[in-house]
Amino acid sequence: MSEASLYFLQQLINGLTIGSTYALIAIGYTMVYGIIGMINFAHGEIYMIGSYISFIVIAGLLGMGMVALPVILVIALVIAVFTASTYGWAVERVAYRPLRGSNRLIPLISAIGMSIFLQNYVVLAQGSRDVALAPQISGSWTFGDPQLFEVSLSYMQLLIWVVTVVCMTALTLFISRSRMGRACRACSEDQGMTNLLGIDTNRTIAMTFVIGAALAAVAGLLLGLYYGVVNPFVGFIAGLKAFTAAVLGGIGSIPGAMLGGLILGVTEALTSAYFPSEYKDVVSFGLLILILLFRPSGLLGKPEVEKV
Amino acid sequence: MMRQNFYTAFFAAGITLILTCLMVGVKLTSEGTELRVVGATAAQWTWIFGGIAIVFLSQLFRDQISAASAGIPRPNLGKLLPAVSVQARLKPWLIAAVIVGLIVWPFMVSRGAVDLATLTLIYVMLGLGLNIVVGLAGLLDLGYVAFYAIGAYTYALLSSYFGLSFWVCLPISALLAATFGFVLGFPVLRLRGDYLAIVTLGFGEIIRILLNNWTGLTGGPNGISGIDKPTLFGLEFNRRASDGATTFHEFMGIDYSSSYKVIFLYLIAVLLVIWVLFVINRLMRMPIGRAWEALREDEIACRSLGLNRTVIKLSAFTFGASTAGFAGCFFAARQGFISPESFVFIESAIILAIVVLGGMGSQFGVILAAIVMTILPEFAREFSEYRMLLFGLLMVLMMRWRPQGLLPSKRPHMELKR
Amino acid sequence: MKQFSKTLLSIGTALAILGSAAAVQAETIKIALAGPSTGPVAQYGDMQKIGVMAAIDDINKAGGVNGMQLEGVIYDDACDPKQAVAVANKIVNDGITHVVGHLCSSSTEPAADVYEEEGVLMITAASTSPSITEKGHQLIFRTIGLDSLQGSMAADYIANTVKPKTLAIIHDKQQYGEGLAQTVKDGLEAKGISAVMFEGVTPGDKDFSALIAKLKKENVDFVYYGGYHPELGLILRQSAEKSFNAQFMGPEGIVNADLAKIAGDATEGVLATAPKSFDQNPENKARVEAITAKGEDPSGPFVFTAYAAVQVMSDAIKAVGDTDPAKLADYIRKNEFDTSIGKVTYDEKGDLTESTFLVYSLHKDGSKTPAAQ
């Protein structure tokens, strides 16, 4: 392969990695939107909290002298997912459920308030500075011609891919096969009707928040390990990107969120590869606006039907 | 019943424990270059268990609490206003009294208070502008801050590159912001609801990132400093006059004091707010203003009645943007310094919160909400680090307490008498 | 009309003067300490705080200034230009007329405009961007050298000692980082060395994998980074993961134990220009001990420059016998001060007439040693 194509391959790998994590966070936005039609601005903060919890668990276990890395990571994953899900559930219960049925701007403002609250809560609890964790999984495969360009795929990147694929498969199976998943889909079609059929819609809605939060926590752990740094403000930026990804793919559609995340990640990487990297966000937002102009409901979204 | 509550209370307390035990109970620190965790201090654990106890007790006795709170009458701010007929008679006097009050007031209070009042007036302007878009026309705009930024940068750039004065730049800023509103609005206004929200959000971010990266023109993240302050018919409010100009205190023959400048800026802000209010009030009574509200209520009905939806939406968007340009121009002049950091998304969110909290569509409510939203964080400065935490919490609580806003708009209406 | 507004204005001023008179008569002289105590570079704010508080303690123990005690009041600007202007206005509104700060050059410059206009004396202990003192301000000083010095020194070191084959310059687009990067670039071009890349990154960004791949493609073997440690730390860490092994160099804004926390082993051998380690000076021994006794770290690059800033201020107040900023500024410009960073004198612009930077080599345990010449 030529140097140019090896370079392209490297940037594609980088883009797919970051895109996978966007996709994981985007699921939370898209599911909540699909079921109650609100933008959950506090979702990015759940991701940040997931990152913090996993850092706390990893640092704690390492401090206790535990050395088996896979065990540490699994424990961290379980605790982070559990705690973040609880946060997701509590946020829905406190800030959104009492507002259900009011003008759609009301929960939006409540969500923004919740986002500010959670951010500052973590600032108070953990301080506003960067917390850094030493690299846990290091090393990479390299291939390509060392004379021209060496492509590297780090073990961490591979782990991110594998975990994302596993999570997505599990989610797809859950939504299409399980009872709860069917209830979710029914709820997003018609809440009133679902309620009449004896399904507890409140519980189903709470469940979507929990699933979204759990996936955000997985992303929090993965990105925490990948970058090794977390601060209370990472959630906001990541949330904004993930939300963009969800809209790009068609908000409300789960495959759309996955696709949107990957497209956004790859766009960012390729923009920084061939242009000055500071313009990557301009290009990704520009792409979003363009796609929405030609497909007003996103790539895989259902076109909205106007009802009187 | 009590037993049911006991289970709920127990459950809620458990949830609170899960939420706080790792996040507050353990703190990440570093020891050398290693990341370590330390347990919280006894004081923090007291806080955690105090919080859990409060949650537990409030859930346990929630019937009693809700019964007790039902006894407290909810304040109805609308009732505070006199009846419509009296209002009409009092109105000119009331307006005159308020304007006189606004003009005399700054001479009696501290410099800091006047400064804060000026900031509040900027938010009043922004709130009124966004109110046209969101409150009246029902278009959800999450990137309103972009027009504010355009206004601010227009003045900053024209003043620092071409030396144009504030008064010349004020209409230019408004016009340019309106043009951007028009150009953006044209393609995107056919998007519906939340898609419009995300596109405007994206537009806001694009403007901010461009300002941040176009270092040659805008100074990038360092912003533009040393922006000229407004002048009073050519009189400057600086300590020393620039070349060929006179300062205010020299002209008046009094000693220099920096509070003249603060008061002067405040008076300009008052003037601008009155102007904006006047224009919007006129617009609302014109056919276009009626059309905005009609469109918000029912888009399909509007179209069936032959109203041109694009023109209506576009005009609302453009007027909203021009108000933001106005506010931005004044903001740049007041600060003397602007950077892209002043125009982040959270700023849009706060302006939107002002509109929603005020009661969408209600101008008086928006003014009240702008005052609440700017003064509250200042009062909360006492709580220093808890300030933003309380601010976020209040946003959530206010939405629960008064989802319709502080002063929901009341339209003059007729009722049939039986 | 003229008479009327005059009366109104004089009422206003009378009230304002009453308010400020009350502040002046107080027993203490308040010194505002402005810098980041939150945000990504709060570590540097701590260094400044350690130095200022130590100086205030020492001076107060020795009997204060003209019988008055000094009092430090901390203001947080989070290293954000917007908040810096707000903080500067707040300091003015609070009636404080002596400031040590701000820290980041991009915050200091707009804040300095406010102080100059409002008659507040400011001494920065950490801002190195030349443009701060280039506007003819009268009340603005510093106790640290300029980027023009630091940058040309880095350029000399790169050209004479490192002699890289392919060089790239990366910066964070902020006043401090980009200014330095530009100075280094100009300095190297004067010596006939040109950089293959001159590119900005966005502060707060976390993913630099695309940038690293780009550097790798250009076969870069030396990178100069103008900016602060959070971004460089991530660049170093991700470079190590992607087996990109170039030599990195940065300014004093990366000299901080947190760089090693983020980058781990990749920190070993990174070069940095920084003010001389004043904590090694024998005359600062007692001061270092006092700081260490409080459980604080005296080795940060801004600790003793901040200490010196307070010394300059208090010595000037002592000599002039007044706290009026204009008189103090006049005195500072004309006299020599004996401080924790040695004897200092000022030029007309308010810059030090003499200052020293050294090239250091950083280590993975967070320490630094002078680099081989």
Image (cartoon, helix red, strand yellow):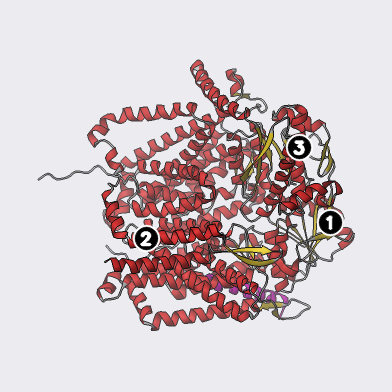
Please tell me whether mark 2 sits on a helix, a strand or a loop: helix
The span from disc 2 to disc 1 (Cα, nearest Å) is 62 Å
1 and 3 marks on the same chain? yes
Q: Nearer the viewer, mark 2 or mark 1?
A: 2
Please tell me whether mark 1 sits on a helix, a strand or a loop: strand
Task: Check disc 3: other Cα within 10 Å, few if <14, some if 14-19, many if 20+.
Answer: few
- What amino acid is labelled 2 in the image? Leu
Residue A7 magenta-drawn? yes
- What amino acid is labelled 3 in the image? Ala
Circle 2 marks a residue in which chain? B
Q: Which residue is mark 3?
A: C62
2 and 1 marks on the same chain? no
Position of residue A170 measured from the top left corner of the image (x, y, whole percent): 47, 81
Q: Which residue is mark 1?
A: C359
Q: Nearer the viewer, mark 1 or mark 3?
A: 3
User: Which quadrant of the view contains residue A132?
Assistant: bottom right
Position of residue C272 measured from the top left corner of the image (x, y, whole percent): 79, 58
Please tell me whether mark 3 sits on a helix, a strand or a loop: loop
Q: Which residue is mark 2?
A: B57
Residue B205 lies, with reference to residue C322, above or below; the image says: below
Q: Main secondary structure of the magenta part?
A: helix
At x 49%, y 47%, the residue is: B179
Front-most of B52 and A179? Answer: B52
Mark 1 / mark 3, whichever is N-terminal: 3
| Quadrant where the C terminus of chain B is found in the figure | top left
What span is in magenta? Answer: A1-23
Position of residue B289 measured from the top left corner of the image (x, y, whole percent): 33, 44
Residue B346 lies, with reference to residue B286, above or below; the image says: below
Q: Do labels 2 and 1 touch, CB within 8 Å?
A: no
The span from disc 1 to disc 3 (Cα, nearest Å) is 36 Å
Front-most of A221 and A19? Answer: A221
At x 79%, y 78%, the residue is: A147
